[in-house]
Image (cartoon, rainbow, N blue to C red):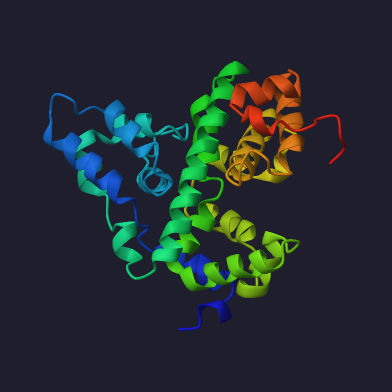
């Protein structure tokens, strides 16, 4: 099946119905928790889900689809969602399956890339959370989730279109100047950022998340926090000598009202690869 000939509408429709796979480690950790009633709580379950973007989406989607008419406020926090659902209902209604590792059997190269993106997203979520707390933003948990899910479309496509995603990666390795969106448009006929906007609306994720995940709303401090965290996680994944990092440090410094040098210390940038922040980039 030549998936790349199928357009944006096809993929949004297909992924709206698809059962999104979750990490094997998430399934294991949840099973272990369920067996130990002494440790089982909404908070303990939420901590396991916190590192898995796909499981996070599963819970939020379920809650949005089954919210009561009397519910006025949207629920973005996973722990709050679990309290509303009940932990036993969570295990019954949103089981941790299928598994990513089963769904991507025989696609080891793509699986490795997916795990890199998930790891990067987790790091972004930790940066965003830390900075939100530092800025005394009471929506720190929502900001953490927005950073965790910022690259959700990329993760989903590694699961469902691994060969096309590998093709995009190969094109970019061959031509370092080729921008990600341009490569995606060449292969899919659309970029994943546009797909994600449609997908999260179709999934009816909370409005607050849609705003926080939308780079176009960058005039808002919370969105800037998410964007800065995602950029830092993406660029530092290439090594602390990545050419884009000095600009990231400046953006984060502006967000937190500190000096770029303080940001470097704060995020643990390798002292051996300190960038000259005075040079224009």
Position of 98 with respect to 17 (left or right) is left
- The foreground one among 229 and 13 is 229
* Rendered-image quadrant of the C terminus: top right
Q: Is residue 161 visible?
A: no
Residue 186 rendering spot, x and y as whole percentages: 67, 73
Residue at 51% x, 69% y is 11
Task: Using the rendered image of the protein, determine whether residue 1 is visible from the camera's viewpoint.
Answer: yes
Q: Can you name the residue that lies furthest to the front here?
A: 272
Q: Which residue is most to the bottom?
A: 1
| Marker count (numbered) | 0
Q: Judge by depth and name the residue closer to the eye, 240 or 100.
A: 240
Residue 127 position within the rendered picture, expressed as x and y whole percent measured from the top left:
56, 30
Position of the N terminus by quadrant: bottom left
Which residue is painted at 72% across and 36% down in the image? 248
Image x and y of residue 237, in percent = 57, 44
Q: Is residue 179 above or below residue 188?
A: above
**Relative to residue 191, is residue 68 depicted above or below?**
above
Residue 195 falls in which quadrant of the image?
Answer: bottom right
Residue 219: image location, x then y, percent: 75, 34
What residue is shown at x 65% (from left), y 41% (from top)?
231
Question: Relative to residue 273, is residue 78 drawn left or right?
Answer: left
Residue, x 61% and y 43% (percent of image)? 239
């Amino acid at each position: 099946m030549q998936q790349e000939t199928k357009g944006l509408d096809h993929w949004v429709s297909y992924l709206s119905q698809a059962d999104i796979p979750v990490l094997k480690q998430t399934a294991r950790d949840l099973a272990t928790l369920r067996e130990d009633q002494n440790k089982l709580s909404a908070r303990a379950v939420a901590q396991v889900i916190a590192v898995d973007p796909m499981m996070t989406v599963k819970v939020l989607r379920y809650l949005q689809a089954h919210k009561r008419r009397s519910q006025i406020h949207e629920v973005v926090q996973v722990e709050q969602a679990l309290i509303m659902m009940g932990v036993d209902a969570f295990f019954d209604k949103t089981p941790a399956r299928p598994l990513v590792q089963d769904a991507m059997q025989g696609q080891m190269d793509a699986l490795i890339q997916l795990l890199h993106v998930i790891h990067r997203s987790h790091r972004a979520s930790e940066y965003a959370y830390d900075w939100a707390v530092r800025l005394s933003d009471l929506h720190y948990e929502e900001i953490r989730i927005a950073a965790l899910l910022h690259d959700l479309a990329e993760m989903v496509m590694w699961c469902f279109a691994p060969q096309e995603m590998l093709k995009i990666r190969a094109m970019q390795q061959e031509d370092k100047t080729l921008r990600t969106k341009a490569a995606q448009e060449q292969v899919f006929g659309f970029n994943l950022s546009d797909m994600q906007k449609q997908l999260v609306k179709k999934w009816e994720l909370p409005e607050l998340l849609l705003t926080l995940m939308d780079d176009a709303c960058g005039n808002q401090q919370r969105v800037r926090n998410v964007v800065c965290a995602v950029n830092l996680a993406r660029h530092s994944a290439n090594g602390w000598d990545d050419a884009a990092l000095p600009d990231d440090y400046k953006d984060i410094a502006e967000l937190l009202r500190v000096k770029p040098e303080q940001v470097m210390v704060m995020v643990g940038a390798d002292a051996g690869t300190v960038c000259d922040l005075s040079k224009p980039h």
